[in-house]
Image: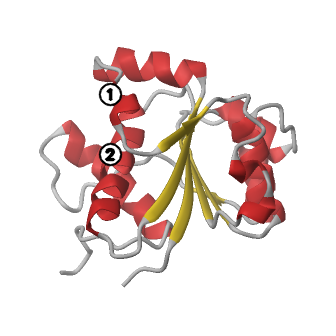
């Protein structure tokens, strides 16, 4: 049985809305099945909403039964460490957002929440979505890693022989779910 969880899911305008959708789908399913509910706060950039609509052809992000917070709402509970959110995932994570997090620039709720998670020594997972990386990107990833964050590039695997775009994307999301310490029945190497 999972402990009560308090999770932040942040979505930026980087390409890869499918990753955010699949993660939110998984958390919604776990939330519905769990004895101990998962408290989820979601923050999306304006570009994230635009890219979601462009890539997925809908605005269904608003259909999830989670609390959504405006990107400028510094009264959101996870803008403070006292709210004790234990995990934050930025999926997909743009290089601009990564750079602001790496340099402590808390200019919106997303970057403030990441700063809080890092200062409280809790789990921050950034699903970097860019290719190729330049040296600035790499140095920002190094800085976040040294501060305690986890860089999880949106790099799919093919061991499970995925057949659809969703199955390919799910190989990345399964890694993120594992990093979040959520139960996950997924392909395991050697099984």
The Cα atoms of the two marked residues, 1 and 2, are separated by 12 Å
| Residue closer to the observer: 19 or 6 | 6
Query: Which circle marks residue 6 in the picture?
Result: none
User: Which residue sits at x=32%, y=71%?
Assistant: 34
Q: Is residue 166 left or right of residue 34?
A: left
Label number found at residue 60:
1
Residue at 29 percent of width and 51 percent of height: 170
Residue at which label 2 appears: 22
Q: Position of residue 10 (x, y in %)?
A: 57, 42
Q: Nearer the viewer, residue 169 or 137?
A: 169
Q: Is residue 131 above or below residue 140?
A: above
**Depicted 71 relative to depicted 6: above or below:** above
Decide if residue 147 is on the left or right side of residue 16. Answer: right
| Mark positioned earlier in the residue sequence (1 or 2) | 2
Residue at image x 60%, y 26%?
A: 45
Residue 48 spot, x, y in % from top left: 52, 25
> Image point 87% across, 44% down: which residue?
104
Q: Position of residue 35 (x, y in %)?
A: 33, 76
Compared to residue 128, the image places residue 108 above or below, namely above
| On-image quarter of the C terminus | bottom left
- Count up the numbered dots: 2
Question: SS of the residue at dot 2?
Answer: helix
Q: Which residue lies furthest to the bottom in this view?
A: 1
């Amino acid at each position: 049985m999972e402990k009560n969880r308090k999770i932040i899911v942040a979505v930026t305008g980087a390409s890869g809305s499918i990753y955010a959708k699949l993660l939110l789908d998984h958390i919604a399913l776990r939330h519905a099945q769990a004895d101990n509910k998962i408290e989820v706060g979601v923050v999306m950039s304006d570009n994230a909403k635009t890219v979601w609509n462009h890539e997925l052809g809908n605005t269904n992000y608003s259909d999830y039964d989670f609390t959504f917070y405006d990107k400028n709402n510094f009264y959101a509970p996870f803008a403070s460490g006292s709210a004790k959110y234990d995990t934050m995932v930025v999926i997909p994570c743009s290089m601009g957002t990564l750079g602001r997090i790496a340099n402590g620039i808390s200019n919106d709720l997303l970057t403030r929440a990441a700063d809080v998670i890092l200062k409280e020594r809790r789990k921050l997972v950034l699903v970097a979505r860019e290719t190729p990386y330049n040296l600035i990107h790499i140095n920002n990833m190094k800085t976040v890693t040294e501060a305690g964050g986890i860089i999880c590039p949106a790099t799919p695997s093919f061991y499970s022989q995925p057949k659809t775009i969703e199955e390919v994307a799910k190989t990345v999301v399964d890694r993120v779910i594992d990093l979040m310490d959520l139960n996950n029945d997924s392909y395991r190497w050697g099984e």
